[in-house]
Image: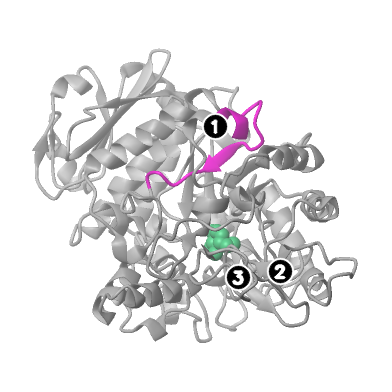
Amino acid sequence: MNRTLKWWQSCQVYQVYPKSFLDTTGSGTGDLNGITAKLDYLKTLGTGAVWLTPVYPSPMVDNGYDIADYEGIDPSYGTMADMERLIAEAKKRDIRIVMDLVFNHSSDQHPWFLQSKKDRTNPKADWYIWRDAKPDGSAPTNWRSIFGGSAWTWCEERQQYYLHTFAPQQPDLNWANPEVRQALYHAANFWLDKGVGGFRIDAIVYIKKPAFVDGQPDSTDGLVDIHAMTANTTGILDYLHEFKKNVFDGHDIFTVGEANGVPPEDLDKWVGEKGVFSMLFEFSHMDLQFPGGAEVWCHAKPWPLTALKKALSASQAATAENGWYPIFFENHDQPRCINHFMPEGADRTLAAKAMATVLLTLRGTPFIFEGQEIGMANVKWGSIECYNDISSHGQYKRALAEGHTEAMALDAVHKFSRDNARTPMQWSRSTHAGFTKGLPWLPVEHDRNWTVEVEAEDENSVLSYYRRLAKLRKGIEALTAGDYVELLPSDESIYAFRRTVGAEATVTIVNFTGEEVSYDDNLVKGMKLLTDSYPAAAQEDEEPGKLRPYEAVVYMTQEAEKTFSKEAECV
Ligand code: NOJ
């Protein structure tokens, strides 16, 4: 194996949504001990790091992304001792725990905000973004928050408005105040001292505020999307370099910034040697249905496979020399990938395996979101009241305000609700799929075939396929360190690419349609089939140059095969 890759470049990162992972107390919500109990399971997926979405004390208006204490653990998840045990048990298995830093905003119940809002002269008066009303009493600007409605909320006590990029219960911190920055660095260092292996940094593109001016309204509500007004503002990198110097430098960790909208030409300033983070989550391949940029669910448009391929290839090109690419098709904010990227009605197992093949053979660090490895799917609940996700409610309201019918508004929620990703993990044949002995906070899928227990017994399951791909990635250097070249870029049905390191190469070829398709078999001439997503019994019918519906194959050169057989013994 190539020893020059860093630890986090040759493993998988597994994202846990703790509230939905495993409940060990019967409370109906997951907890830290539930994660510790499943570390051996996570290891079977080649997991080297577990990213936890926020587990800090929180009123849970946005399920933990509204933090009331950056250096504590919410009692619903357990105690600090449970957290320390999780970090230690993970370390024994060579897994690092990665914390989510939500530093653009806190909860409105954070003691900092409770003090800040009291009056205009208290010691924390300037810790948040406060502005006077316009002469007519209206909000300082016409910015629309990401969850809908004005981004400003009036505070009676202070007789001023405060800014919130997200919900009113998530006031934005004032990074222009050096005391605020130091307090945040202190929190991040608190977790480094506990031994965490890295950070995912939330909504980081919004920390530097531009001039507070109105924008051109983009809808009938007279407001403009705040992202268009405040993301990636000049000067943001000065803050980020200071952050890096005070927190990340000198630690063997990785950092991944949630940084929508950083243009590829600026990437070297954000990642890699000269940049700030190890990786950036960007969403060009996730937001294809929103070509204008604004994520308005009821405006979603269909997109062709070539658009997905173009976006992925552009990200591969941008990170070929700068930093490293975090590959992801799911997270806690996105629909399930089989629903997002595959046609409605596609065979669930084959669709999940096709997405797995791309995820685990592209160049970069694969991020697996809990349940993705067993092919978990979107939900379709009967009314908006069934949904917990704050964003679903905002989007539903907006759709109605724009004149869509209730059925249309609900259809958009079915497709894009963040609850699609947040339903409890399906472990076993038991009640509530083994997630809880109590009442689950969100409904659990009824079909017990899609559980870890059932899939672990089946060599043709999605789970077994993920485990196999994890071993292949570990055993074949081309799959981790290899360069990426796209093949057949204009093909509307097939995504194909080659990964090469020295004489070793692999070729991945995936059919995104329910039809049989063909390709030029010269692409794999002289190569050997490394893996096929079809069931074992159907694999002898595999033929170079042809793909069955949703079939995914990976070929390798003889050189790769030689290295693999040596390495396979140590897997
Ligand atoms: C991005 C997070 O991924 C999302 O879940 C959250 O609602 C917002 N940032 C606000 O923190």
How far apart marks 3 and 2 lie (CA) works out to 8 Å
Q: How far from the left and from the top, in percent, is residue 381?
A: 33, 80
* Residue pointed to by mark 3: 139
How far apart marks 1 and 3 lie (CA) works out to 34 Å
Picture disc at residue 54: none
Q: Which of 371 and 413 is in front in this view?
A: 413
On screen, residue 531 above or below 154: above
Picture disc at residue 132: 2
Q: Does the residue labelled 1 lie within 8 Å of ligand 1?
A: no
How far apart marks 1 and 2 lie (CA) works out to 36 Å
Does the magenta-highlighted stretch encompass residue 81? Answer: no
Q: Please name the predominant secondary structure of the magenta segment in the image.
A: loop
* Residue pointed to by mark 1: 267
Q: Which of 56 and 454 is in front in this view?
A: 56
Residue at (37% x, 59% y) in the render: 374
Residue at (67% x, 38% y) in the render: 237
Q: In which quarter of the image is ligand 1?
A: bottom right
Horizontally, is 126 left or right of 273 in the view? right
In front of the other: label 1 or label 3? 3
Q: How far from the left and from the top, in percent, is residue 427?
A: 45, 69
Q: Are marks 3 and 2 in contact (CB under 8 Å)?
A: no
Magenta segment boundaries in residue numbering: 267-285
Secondary structure of residue under mark 3? loop
Q: Are marks 1 and 3 in contact (CB under 8 Å)?
A: no
Dot 3 or dot 2, earlier in sequence: 2
On screen, residue 518 above or below 515: above
Secondary structure of residue under mark 2? loop
Residue 508 in sight from this viewpoint: no
Q: Are marks 1 and 2 in contact (CB under 8 Å)?
A: no
Q: How far from the left and from the top, in percent, is residue 251?
A: 76, 37
